[in-house]
Image (cartoon, rainbow, N blue to C red):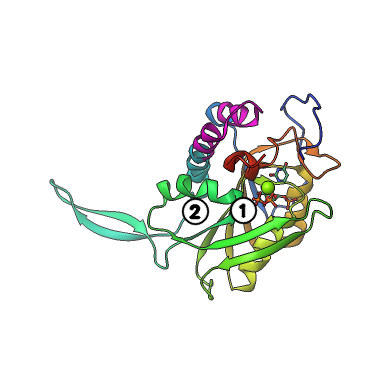
């Protein structure tokens, strides 16, 4: 249950305190804000919601992959030889958090087609707001892998925090999470949890707050339900 019909206009909500160790990139682009506005609108049907989610992820992935590791490569153009780059080995790992994160996968691999894809299934108990992990399909050793976690919603931060810990436990050292919306509470929780480990958050927008049901305000409701028509 999204919990309220409060009329809240997305705007500048002021600075969120987070440490310098954790990089937080909040998109500031009219196309992203436009597409998010349509997503937020409760009248937007699932097919449009799914399409816009993919488009938004592709736009956010451009920023999220800014530090993707590349290696030099020698090529020959029709004119001359030249040095370029290609994505380094081992390949980056993209990890959508089921279910809603699955709606972001195509948008991500459009930009990173050679990435490997692993899966984490998580669901939040809507009473306690605690996440549980019900599925996992990931490489056993993630050391040396750049990991990109996909989840549209960073609400309390419980689910993303658990996913980040899962990846760290497998040896990951470099994690970037892409979320469409995040709250100040969720960002602060991830910041406190990761300490000085290498985590970057890339958000489409930072919303105002969590409501008493743990939903993002103004938010867009339950992302999984809206993607898959289960309302
Ligand atoms: O920051 P949190 O408070 O943990 O909330 C965010 C989580 O809630 C949603 O998943 P949900 O549990 O609804 O599962 P679903 O994707 O199957 O709908 C969302 O996709 C996040 O994973
Ligand atoms: O607002 C919210 C919070 C958690 N999960 C969602 O899908 N939406
Ligand atoms: Mg859900």
Residue 155 at what x, y percent from top left? 74, 46
Residue on which disc 1 sits: 200
Q: Which numbered circle lies on residue 67? A: 2
Which residue is pictured at 32% across the width and 60% down the height? 72
Disc 1 is placed on an element classified as strand
**Main secondary-structure element of the magenta-colored stretch:** helix
Residue 33 at what x, y percent from top left? 59, 29
Tell me where the magenta segment starts and ends, as one range.
34-53
Total marks shown come to 2
Marks 2/1 in contact by CB < 8 Å: the verdict is yes
Disc 2 residue crowd, few under 14, some 14–19, many 20+, Cα 10 Å:
few
Disc 2 is placed on an element classified as loop
Q: Which numbered circle lies on residue 130? A: none
> Is residue 181 rendered to the left or right of residue 55?
right
**Residue 197, visible in the rendered structure:** no
For ligand 1, tell me if the residue under mark 1 lies within 8 Å. no
Q: Can you say whether 72 is above or below 103 in the image?
A: below
Which residue is pictured at 39% across the width and 63% down the height? 88
**Residue 72, visible in the rendered structure:** yes
Q: Is residue 46 magenta?
A: yes
Pick the front one: 125 or 78: 125
Q: Earlier in the sequence, mark 2 or mark 1?
A: 2
Q: Residue furthest front?
A: 230
CA distance for labels 2 and 1: 10 Å
Residue 27 at what x, y percent from top left? 59, 37
Which residue is pictured at 42% across the width and 64% down the height? 91
Q: Can you say whether 180 is above or below 173 in the image?
A: above
Q: Quadrant of residue 164?
A: bottom right
Q: Can you say whether 73 is above or below 50 in the image?
A: below
Q: Is residue 15 magenta?
A: no
């Amino acid at each position: 249950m999204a919990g309220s019909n409060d009329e809240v206009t997305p705007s500048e909500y002021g600075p969120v305190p987070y440490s310098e160790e954790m990089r937080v990139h909040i998109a500031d682009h009219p196309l992203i804000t436009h597409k998010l506005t349509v997503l937020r609108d409760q009248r937007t049907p699932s097919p449009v919601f799914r399409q816009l989610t993919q488009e938004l992820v592709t736009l956010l992935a451009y920023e999220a992959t800014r530090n993707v590791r590349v290696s030099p490569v020698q090529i020959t153009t029709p004119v001359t030889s030249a040095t370029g780059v290609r994505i380094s080995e081992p390949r980056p790992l993209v990890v959508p958090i089921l279910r809603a994160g699955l709606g972001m996968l195509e948008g991500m691999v459009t930009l990173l087609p050679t990435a490997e894809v692993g899966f984490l299934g998580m669901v939040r108990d809507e009473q306690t707001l605690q996440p549980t992990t019900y599925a996992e399909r990931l490489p056993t050793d993630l050391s040396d892998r750049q990991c990109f976690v996909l989840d549209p919603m960073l609400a309390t931060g419980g689910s993303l925090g658990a996913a980040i810990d899962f990846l760290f436990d497998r040896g990951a050292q470099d994690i970037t999470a892409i979320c469409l919306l995040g709250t100040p509470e969720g960002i602060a929780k991830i910041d406190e949890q990761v300490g000085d480990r290498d985590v970057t958050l890339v958000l489409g927008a930072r919303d105002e707050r969590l409501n008493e049901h743990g939903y993002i305000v103004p938010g867009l409701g339950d992302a999984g339900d809206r993607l898959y028509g289960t309302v």
